[in-house]
Image (spheres, grey):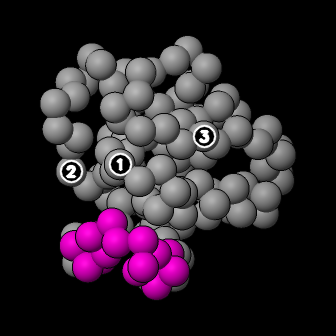
Amino acid sequence: MAHAKRKASTILIKRAYDDASPDDGYRVLVDRVWPRGRSRETLKLAQWMQAIAPSDALRKWFGHDPQRWDEFRQRYLAELHTDEQLARMRSLLADAAGQPMTLVYGAKDTEHNQAVVLRDALLRLQQG
């Protein structure tokens, strides 16, 4: 029997240093390292998905340098395109069960961070 079409989740991104909101829905920390000075209670996470974050080597190479953004984005998308990471992304979408999902990240730069890339990849994946 074919799987019923799941309702697409709205996928938001939010800094770990911004207050959680009930509108955030299913909150997932998508950083490899825990954000400094933030407690589990403050973050109000449904889960911490370290393994979906960029590899340590890629994260360190990028160093949040906007001039490396395009290359970082391509490299991270390549990391996300493995069978293992695709399975993690599908699991994440299933866990959200159609409710809004907020990808939580610690970087200061709101435009050049892994959550931006991951959101785009998740949106493409759920569109089929």
Measure the C-alpha gap from mark 2 to mark 3: 20 Å
Left or right position of 112 against 36: right
Left or right position of 82 against 62: right
User: Which image quarter is the C terminus in?
Assistant: bottom right
Q: Which residue is mark 3?
A: 12
Q: Is residue 98 magenta?
A: no
Q: Residue at x 70, y 39 (%)?
A: 9
- In this rendering, the answer to whether 27 lies above or below 127 is above
Residue bounds of the magenta highlight: 58-73
Q: Residue at x 53, y 29 (%)?
A: 26
Q: What kind of secondary structure does the magenta stretch mostly adopt?
A: helix
| Residue type at the position of mark 3 | Leu
Rendering coords of residue 120 (x, y %): 63, 60
Q: Residue at x 78, y 49 (%)?
A: 3
- In this rendering, the answer to whether 7 lies above or below 121 is above
Q: Which residue is mark 2?
A: 33
Q: Earlier in the sequence, mark 2 or mark 3?
A: 3
Q: How many marks?
A: 3
